[in-house]
Image (cartoon, helix red, strand yellow):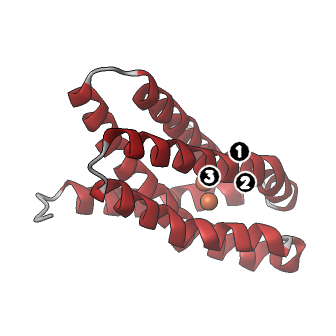
């Protein structure tokens, strides 16, 4: 199977997240909802970390100031706010409040992923970097992803 490019990996993650958000909002089975949410939280934490540790540093190096500052700001905001909102969701006991906060969280995440990254940033990256370079970057991202996955799968003392 040919290596996935960095962009294909991120778009795939976004699609999976979108699906999980949707399922969580439509299921009426509490246990299922909790299981799906755990999965989503883990996947999003990993996604944000892979972007932060590998993807963004590399494209900043390649594209430099071709990337509009508002995109960088948006990403930095996601890096700090996404994990914070997940932590916050973990502490909410009231179901309605949880759902409301969860919907806001979904809107924020999808706006960033779809409107900002897929809509503005990725086309720019694909015009500026070769397919080979994006596949190479994709390999580095898969590696980082696997490291993070095994960290999350270790029995947690949380
Ligand atoms: Fe992002
Ligand atoms: Fe993303």
Q: Looking at the picture, tell me which residue is in the foreground, 92 or 138.
A: 92
Check disc 3: other Cα within 10 Å, few if <14, some if 14-19, many if 20+. some
Left/right placement of residue 71 relative to residue 8 reads: right
Residue, disc 2: 117
Q: Position of residue 136 (x, y in %)?
A: 60, 59
Q: Are marks 3 and 2 in contact (CB under 8 Å)?
A: no
Q: For disc 3, does the CB lie below 8 Å from ligand 1?
A: no
Q: Secondary structure at mark 1?
A: helix
Disc sitting over residue 146 in the figure: none
- Nearer-N-terminus badge (3/2): 3
Q: Position of residue 84 (x, y in %)?
A: 43, 67
Q: Position of residue 5 (x, y in %)?
A: 63, 49
In this rendering, which labeled residue sits more in front, label 3 or label 2?
3
- Nearer-N-terminus badge (1/3): 3
Left/right placement of residue 59 relative to residue 144 reads: right
Q: For residue 95, which quarter of the picture?
A: top left
Residue, disc 1: 114
Disc sitting over residue 108 in the figure: 3
What residue lies at 82% left-to-right and 75% top-to-bottom?
69
What residue lies at 72% left-to-right and 54% top-to-bottom?
117
In this rendering, which labeled residue sits more in front, label 1 or label 3?
3
Q: Are marks 1 and 3 in contact (CB under 8 Å)?
A: no
Q: For disc 2, does the CB lie below 8 Å from ligand 2?
A: yes
Marks 3 and 2, Cα distance to the nearest angstrom? 13 Å
Check disc 1: other Cα within 10 Å, few if <14, some if 14-19, many if 20+. some
What residue lies at 25% left-to-right and 28% top-to-bottom?
30
Marks 1 and 2, Cα distance to the nearest angstrom? 6 Å
What residue lies at 84% left-to-right and 70% top-to-bottom?
67
Note whether residue 111 is visible. Answer: yes
Q: Judge whether 132 appears above or below 33 on screen.
A: below
Q: Are marks 1 and 2 in contact (CB under 8 Å)?
A: yes
Q: Judge whether 18 appears above or below 92 on screen.
A: above
């Amino acid at each position: 199977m040919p290596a996935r490019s960095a962009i294909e990996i991120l778009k795939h993650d976004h699609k999976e997240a979108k699906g999980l958000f949707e399922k969580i909002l439509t299921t009426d089975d509490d246990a299922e909802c909790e299981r799906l949410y755990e999965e989503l939280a883990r996947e999003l934490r990993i996604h944000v970390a892979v972007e932060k540790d590998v993807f963004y540093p590399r494209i900043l190096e390649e594209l430099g100031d071709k990337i509009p500052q508002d995109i960088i700001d948006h990403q930095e905001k996601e890096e700090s706010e996404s994990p914070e909102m997940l932590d916050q969701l973990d502490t909410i006991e009231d179901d309605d409040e949880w759902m409301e906060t969860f919907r806001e969280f979904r809107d924020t995440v999808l706006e960033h992923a779809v409107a900002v990254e897929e809509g503005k940033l990725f086309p720019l990256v694909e015009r500026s970097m070769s397919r080979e370079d994006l596949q190479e970057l994709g390999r580095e991202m898969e590696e980082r992803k696997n490291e993070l996955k095994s960290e999350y799968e270790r029995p947690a003392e949380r």
